[in-house]
Amino acid sequence: MSTLPVLVVLCASPDDAPPQLAALSGRVDLRTATEADLGEAVRGARALFLWDFFSGALRDVWEHCGDLQWIHVAAAGVDTLLFDELRGSDVVVTNARGVFDRPIAEYVLAAVLAHAKRLHESSALQRRREWRHRETRSLRGARAVVVGTGGIGRETARLLGAVGMDISVAGSHARTDPELGEVLDSGRLREHLGGVDYLVNAAPLTDRTRGLLDAEVLAALPSTAHVINVGRGPTVVEDDLLAALREGRLDGATLDVFATEPLPEDSPLWDAPGVVVSPHMSGDVLGWRDTLAEQFVANARRWLDAEPLENVVDKRRGYVPGGGTGPQPG
């Protein structure tokens, strides 16, 4: 009987496990499972790797997870993972913080440029073979508020600032940050949106951020403002956003995340004025899955070598505040 610590990898299909896990051969008793057989596979396991990162199956098999010490989810957001029993347990949760920071920041910059330079409008005119001269906006001096002080929000603020935009960042509370400067209180967001050209949401989904971008916040924006959501769908009240767009109180929105995913075919967001839809792909650059797998293997080696784990999630807050020491195999 193996005395190696059992590591379970939850996959969407039986042959979906990343090949990088071979690097842990001889150090763990590796089991792969799908949602259908996770309950049996997780018995006696000390670590669980959620390669199928959107799965909610763990909640259903929690009664079999008595030996579990550590869960790693191959995603930045952990809102679909955390439930009351897990929050109240001693199980340490880590995530994929850092993998998506630059790609998502680049997506936001692309969305800003596409809006300012009217590229989507140009594409539509081209399909109609219509030559129409127009004027575009300059990004130099344009104002943006980025909601979210995690790695994605920080990288987005840096990248937008690099093209000459005037950037403010909002977080869970007002404070002075050595990198970001004065951080605004996201709970008072509407007080800071006058004259803003771009409102970028990169916040995690928590009780505090759910429905954050509601009618009051959207009404505080000028009619020339553009909303970009790369955080989580439920942080935006979609009915309020639709009303603002239809009434001409906003100049469109770029949405990569939605309250329901995939976005239903009958959703009015598909055809809403000025809306650009992408299918939750803002961070998925070429090679992203390899990077996620390699990040997990590096953390698993720390776990096996009794070293501190990286990207430990504060389960109460629902995100990584920075650093942390995880469990060690006994």
Image: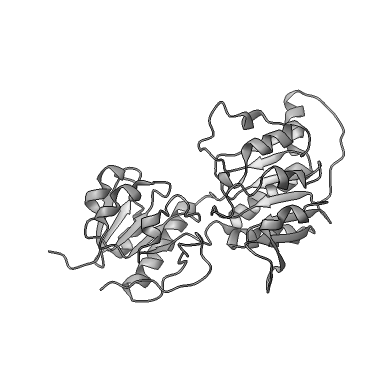
Residue 30 x, y percent position in the rendering: 25, 58
Residue 292 x, y percent position in the rendering: 45, 57
Judge from the rendering whether residue 318 lies leftward or rightward of residue 18; answer left or right. right
The image quadrant where one finds the N terminus is bottom left
Between 279 and 43, which is closer to the camera in this rendering? Answer: 43
Between 40 and 302, which is closer to the camera in this rendering? Answer: 40
Judge from the rendering whether residue 69 lies leftward or rightward of residue 214; answer left or right. left
Judge from the rendering whether residue 135 lies leftward or rightward of residue 118; answer left or right. right
Q: Quadrant of residue 249?
A: top right
Residue 36 x, y percent position in the rendering: 27, 42
Between 185 and 325, which is closer to the camera in this rendering? Answer: 185
Among all residues in the image, which is located at the extreme top?
Answer: 128
Whether residue 42 appears in this view of the structure is no
Q: Quadrant of residue 103?
A: bottom right
The image quadrant where one finds the C terminus is bottom left
Whether residue 279 appears in this view of the structure is yes
At 42% from the left and 50% from the top, the residue drawn is: 53
At 38% from the left and 52% from the top, the residue drawn is: 51
